[in-house]
Amino acid sequence: MRTLFGMILGCLLTIAVVYMYDTMATSTVTSGPASAQRGQIVNWDVAASEWGRMTDKVRLAWTRLTANIG
């Protein structure tokens, strides 16, 4: 159980750190040559659309599963 919790926590921490890095890389507060060379790690628009597709598929599978039970 600790291993599973550690894996989930590690994934969430990794996503949070990458999100913070990307937010700082594209922030209007940072300016100058250093900010021009840094780019985003993740394309968050694509990640959001893929997340939406995955949740729709899971919801559809759950609906089919519960419909077959009842």
Image (tube, grey):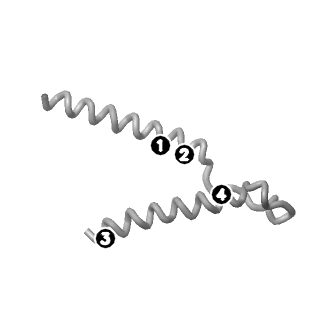
Q: Secondary structure at mark 1?
A: helix
The amino acid marked with disc number 2 is Ala
The amino acid marked with disc number 3 is Thr
Q: Is residue 40 above or below residue 44?
A: below
Disc nearer the start of the sequence (4/1): 4
* Residue at 53% over, 38% down: 49
* Residue at 47% over, 43% down: 51
Residue at the spot of label 1 = 51
Residue at the spot of label 4 = 22
What is the residue that sits farthest to the left in this orientation? 70
Q: Secondary structure at mark 2?
A: helix
Contact between labelled residues 3 and 4, with CB atoms less than 8 Å apart:
no
Disc nearer the start of the sequence (2/3): 3
Q: Which of the two marks, 4 or 2, is nearer to us in this view?
A: 4
Disc nearer the start of the sequence (3/1): 3
Q: Is residue 53 above or below residue 41?
A: above
Q: Secondary structure at mark 3?
A: helix
User: Dot 3: few (<14), some (14–19), or many (≥20) neighbours within 10 Å?
Assistant: few
Give how far apart the Cα atoms at labels 2 and 3 are: 26 Å
Residue 28 found in image quarter: bottom right
Contact between labelled residues 1 and 3, with CB atoms less than 8 Å apart:
no
User: Dot 4: few (<14), some (14–19), or many (≥20) neighbours within 10 Å?
Assistant: some
Give left or right: position of 57 versus 50.
left
What is the residue that sits farthest to the front in this orientation? 29
